[in-house]
Image: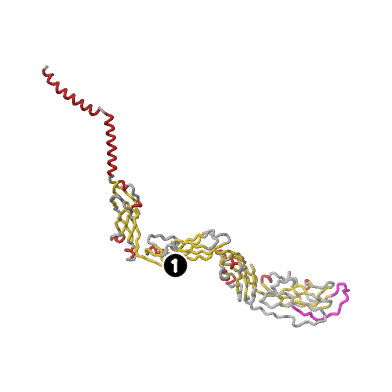
Amino acid sequence: MKKNNNNTPAKNIKNQSNGRIHRFFFNNTGIKICSMVIAVIVWAIIINIDDPYKTRSFNVEVETINESALNSVNKVYEIIEGNNALVKVKGKKSIVDKLSSSDIRAVADLSNLSAVNAVPIQPSLRKTVSSEVIMECNQVLKVSLENRESKQVKINVIASGAPGEGYTLGECNAKPNMIEVSGGESAVGQIASVKVLLNVNGATEDFFKRLVPVAYDEDDNRVESSTLSFSNDFIRVYAHILEEKTIPVKVKIKGKPADGYVYTTTDCLPEQVRVAGSSSRLSNISSITIPVDISGMTTSSQNLEQDIYISDYLPEGITPVEESETVSIRITLEQVIKKNIEADTDTIGFSSLRNGLRAEITDNTDKVNIVISGRISVLNSITNENANVVINCSGLDEGVYTLPVDIKNLDNSCKILEADKLRVRIYDINQQQNTEPPESTTEAPIVETIPDTDNTQPPSPSPTPSQSPDEGEDDNNEDDTEDSDEQDTENDN
């Protein structure tokens, strides 16, 4: 019993300790939870008020400075690595969170190029902030160096589009019309031309534009290089808009072909051309005349077909529209030949007999001959069988006459050089056939009756009988006409 009494105080102490722990954790639980929440809030407030540091990364375009250091040694550069850099910014959260890429500057100083043509990229802030920030960039800018080259190139204006209806694009003037191109020798060496592109779509009056020059190579491909620069950033182009007019083309033939040849026709294509100019100048032009000299030409001459630039024959201030710059002219010449026509006497007719008269051939001849001169194409169509051989009895009364034979409806380009003569009796159809009037043995004078349009040969004689059978034959029956030194034939196409 004594033993049990000795253990009782220790047990009571243990129970009292456990009770205190239980009361600490489980008594007033709601108050304790609220205290914990309040503590967290207070901690967050303290943290934000304290403004801790933060690091952010920005992708920034790199700028180059001090290019003059390369220019002074006649060098140009082209960036091969490091156009953009990754910049880390460390600072207070309130500051760093408000930054953007545009607030950061990354600079490469070309005066500090290393032996391997590289230079460190130095970041900095473009604006002032309330607290210090730390900026870091571990990248470098690498470039390739090349000798500097320059040359003068003419400006070419390339128009696109179409002006308004009834108008066309005239002259385009570029100011300046020459430009200096500078850059790396490899890029400048490729340049074959410098162009500016001008849009004239719908234009009806003169205008000017400021255009950017562009370099092209021999294959008309654009030459692109960061080293290229132009002495002028913009080119002023003045465009003149002209009115259009359609006019006919006339060909004026001058001179005469070689002996034995004759001019026949001229073909001109197109027959009309479009020209452009101011309205006042266009009102003074209704056609264009192109002179062509055929002196001494034959059917084998090379100049029988020609392409002619009409601008050489237009007055000042008038220009041809692009599709009408040239016309094609073809001159046709033919060889002149002689041909003998033989006709049966009984097939010969009589022309221009007066009313009430009749004619008959009294010669005892079966055949007559006529020598004709003319174009080969015409004479080839005349044969002994189809030649309409007649005797001209114009103005003759009754009687007996010696008259030359003729060919009726002979082409104007032909001439009769020689013709046989026949004795012809003309009588009244009401008169008795067996009563013959006294014969006249005279020959009627011969004058020209065939019109001569071919200036290469003298006109041939053709019969025009006299009015009286008693008149003698005129021995001077052929009038020689001289060839004109110049034949002017106007071909209105």
For the rendered model, the colour scheme is secondary structure
Q: Which residues are magenta?
A: 427-447
Q: Quadrant of the N terminus?
A: top left
Q: Residue at x 28, y 32 (%)?
A: 33
Q: Camera-side residue: 483 or 90? A: 90
Q: Amino acid at mark 1?
A: Met
Q: Which residue is mark 1?
A: 178
Instruction: Kindly indicate the quadrant of the structure image that contains residue 8.
Output: top left
Where in the figure is residue 96, as x and y percent of width and height?
31, 48
Instruction: Kindly indicate the quadrant of the structure image that contains residue 391.
Output: bottom right
Q: Is residue 365 above or below residue 23?
A: below
Where in the figure is residue 453, as x and y percent of width and height?
69, 74
Viewer can see residue 75: yes
Q: Is residue 446 magenta?
A: yes
Q: Is residue 3 shown left or right of residue 105? A: left
Q: Is residue 266 shown left or right of residue 75? A: right
Q: Is residue 421 above or below residue 280?
A: below
Where in the figure is residue 80, as x and y percent of width and height?
34, 57
